[in-house]
């Protein structure tokens, strides 16, 4: 059985993070980024994480296969108890439970940090992502029509929330 673990992200994961994210930038509507990211930009992303904005990595047989992170939802101080979550897995490892494990860890750490609410956005085409978030307790709270344009098409976005401060 493959050795799987979830651990805090580290600089050594930057290349894997870039590889995974670039796949989705170039081939899907999982992200609305349109330009590939560099390994250096992922080093910066990892180094900018803090105790309040963690990144968790899924490691399988010693290789980083995906990640989940909390980011600021809004910079204004009144939003300080809300974080935005993101999760990405290498396409070879979808549907194996790794995303659920990452998101479960992310929600647990958000609760421990003291966040009240978590927000996630997903293109409505990304049904697997939406189902993943719902599986770990998020509920749909908003639908925005034609707010993004990628691959020459207008795209809708659904937002999901989880109010962990009420649990």
Image: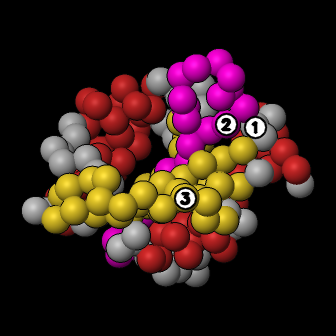
User: Which residue is farthest right?
Assistant: 167
Q: Residue 83: within the magenta?
A: yes
Is residue 98 a member of the stretch shown in magenta? no
Q: Residue furthest left?
A: 152
**Apparent side of residue 79 relative to residue 20 in the rendered image (left or right):** right
Rendering coords of residue 119 (x, y %):
60, 49
Q: Where residue 43 appears, x then y in whole percent?
A: 36, 30
Residue 94 appears left or right of 23: right
Residues packed near mark 3 inside 10 Å, few (<14), some (14 to 19) or many (20 plus): few
What residue would you read off at disc 3? 142
- Quadrant location, the N terminus: bottom right
The quadrant the C terminus occupies is bottom right
Q: Determine whether the residue tagged by mark 3 lies in a helix, strand or loop.
A: strand
User: Within the image, what quadrant is residue 99 found in?
Assistant: bottom right
Magenta range: 72-93
Give whichever of 130, 90 is nearer the camera: 130
Instruction: Identify the element where label 2 is drawn.
Output: strand
Q: Residue at x 67, y 63 (%)?
A: 138
Q: Between residues 101 and 123, which one lies in front from this camera angle?
A: 123
Q: Which residue is mark 1?
A: 115
Say which residue appears at 26% left-offset and 30% top-offset.
40
In x, y percent, where is residue 155?
A: 28, 63
Q: To which residue does mark 2 refer?
A: 82
Left or right, 11 with reference to 77: left
For this view, does 16 lie left or right of residue 119?
left
Question: Separation of disc 2 and disc 1 at Cα?
Answer: 6 Å
Q: Is residue 30 visible?
A: no
Give the spatial CA distance, label 3 vs label 2. 16 Å
Can see residue 43?
yes
| Element assignment for label 1 | loop
Q: Are marks 2 and 1 in contact (CB under 8 Å)?
A: yes
Cα–Cα gap, marks 3 and 1: 20 Å
């Amino acid at each position: 059985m493959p050795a799987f673990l979830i651990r805090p992200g580290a600089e050594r994961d930057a290349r894997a993070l870039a590889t995974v994210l670039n796949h989705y930038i170039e081939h899907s509507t999982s992200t609305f980024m349109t330009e590939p990211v560099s390994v250096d930009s992922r080093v910066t992303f990892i180094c900018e994480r803090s105790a309040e904005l963690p990144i968790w990595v899924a490691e399988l047989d010693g290789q980083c296969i995906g990640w989940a992170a909390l980011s600021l939802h809004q910079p204004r101080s009144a939003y300080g108890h809300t974080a935005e979550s993101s999760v990405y897995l290498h396409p070879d490892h979808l549907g194996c439970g790794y995303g659920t494990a990452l998101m479960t860890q992310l929600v647990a750490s958000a609760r421990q940090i003291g966040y009240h609410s978590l927000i996630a956005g997903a293109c409505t085409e990304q049904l697997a992502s939406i189902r993943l978030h719902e599986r770990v307790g998020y509920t749909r709270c908003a639908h925005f029509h034609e707010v993004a344009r990628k691959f020459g098409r207008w795209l809708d976005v659904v937002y999901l929330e989880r109010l962990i401060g009420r649990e």
